[in-house]
Image (tube, grey):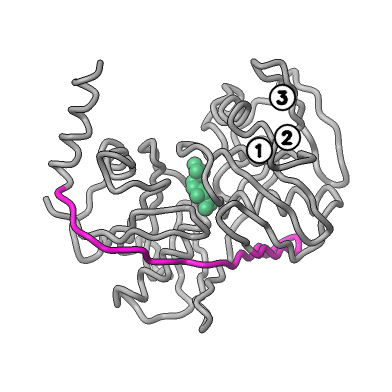
Amino acid sequence: MIWNFTKMHGAGNDFVVLDGVRQAIEMTPERARALADRHFGVGADQLLVVENPLHPEADFRYRVFNADGGEVEHCGNGARCFVRFVHDQGLSRRNPLRAEICTGLITLFESESGEVAVDMGSTRYDPAAVHFDTQGLQSHTKGQDTLWQLPLPDGSTPELSLVAISNPHAVQIVTDIETAPVAQTGPLIESNPRFAQRVNAGFMQVLDRHSIKLRVFERGAGETLACGTGACAATVAGIRQGLLDSPVLVHTRGGPLNIEWDGTALRMSGPAVSVFSGQIDIDALTHSFNSKDANHP
Ligand SMILES: N[C@H](CCC[C@H](N)C(=O)O)C(=O)O
């Protein structure tokens, strides 16, 4: 089966975007992994599928699959690429657009400058929102936030702020983002058994009250150049801890994102870039991707 796709990125967080309105896209974890693979497939951090909505007030449904094949709740950088894709492909000229994600509707607006603003939907900051088991753990309050001390197998005990931007985030503050132990402890947090659905592990360095640096070891994708929901989670955590004031410029390795939060409405704005379009035989791709494992058991 031949699928048309477009390769896009938002601040270096890259995606394969598929039109599931005008073509029959049946995404599976296996196909997602094959498409995302940077050797056998197109290569991406996440796959985005645009579909007809189920919600009566939505223009489209927007589904997100991580590189490991898992379907997830939200993708901030992907949301910006979604609206650029819908407009570029002529699927709709509406602006703003309303997209249906698993936790409800989000509104997206493409400006004349090409930046895209996204009202990011619901924000929660309780352990249950990120499916975290707090039993027996130490915690303390910092401003309005609660920091949980999570012992890791390497002997470290990071203090984590828990934030759900529909998807789960655990954010810690570091003094130097360049030497932060993202590769060492990111995976230990991402797959820690206390997070029943795993978690995106954020590392933020506060620069001043309106700017931070951020790196995120993403659930199901590893460290990415930028994470939109991660930028939102870090901003919410920093404001609740009394360290930041809205708006916050979040410097990521892929470029800056602007986040605004008034305690209720959460808005992110940033770039969305189309890189190239193409076609792929998804069955042949999936077969060759799977055969690689057979050659090297
Ligand atoms: N890895 C995330 C999904 C993608 C989020 C990120 N790429 C963004 O821009 O928000 C998760 O498993 O929740």
Please give the range of residues in magenta: 258-281
Q: Dividing the image into 4 quarters, which one contains the C terminus?
A: top left
* Image coords of residue 28 (percent x, y): 27, 41
Q: Secondary structure at mark 1?
A: strand
Report the residue marked by disc 2.
160
| N-terminal label among 1 and 3 | 3
The main secondary structure of the magenta stretch is strand
Tell me: residue 263, above or below residue 185: below
Q: Residue at x 22, y 48 (%)?
A: 26
Q: For the residue marked with disc 1, what is the amino acid?
A: Ala
Q: Residue at x 70, y 62 (%)?
A: 249
Report the residue marked by disc 1.
170
* Image coords of residue 216 (percent x, y): 60, 42
Do callouts 1 and 2 mark residues in contact (Cβ within 8 Å)?
A: yes
Picture disc at residue 258: none
Do callouts 3 and 2 mark residues in contact (Cβ within 8 Å)?
A: yes
Report the residue marked by disc 3.
150
* Image coords of residue 77 (percent x, y): 51, 58
Q: Secondary structure at mark 3?
A: loop
Tell me: residue 218, above or below residue 292: below
| N-terminal label among 3 and 2 | 3
Figure quadrant of residue 118: bottom right
Check mark 3 vs ligand 1: CB closer than 8 Å? yes or no. no
Q: For the residue marked with disc 2, what is the amino acid?
A: Leu
Figure quadrant of residue 36: top left
| N-terminal label among 1 and 2 | 2
* Image coords of residue 295 (percent x, y): 19, 21
Do callouts 1 and 3 mark residues in contact (Cβ within 8 Å)?
A: yes
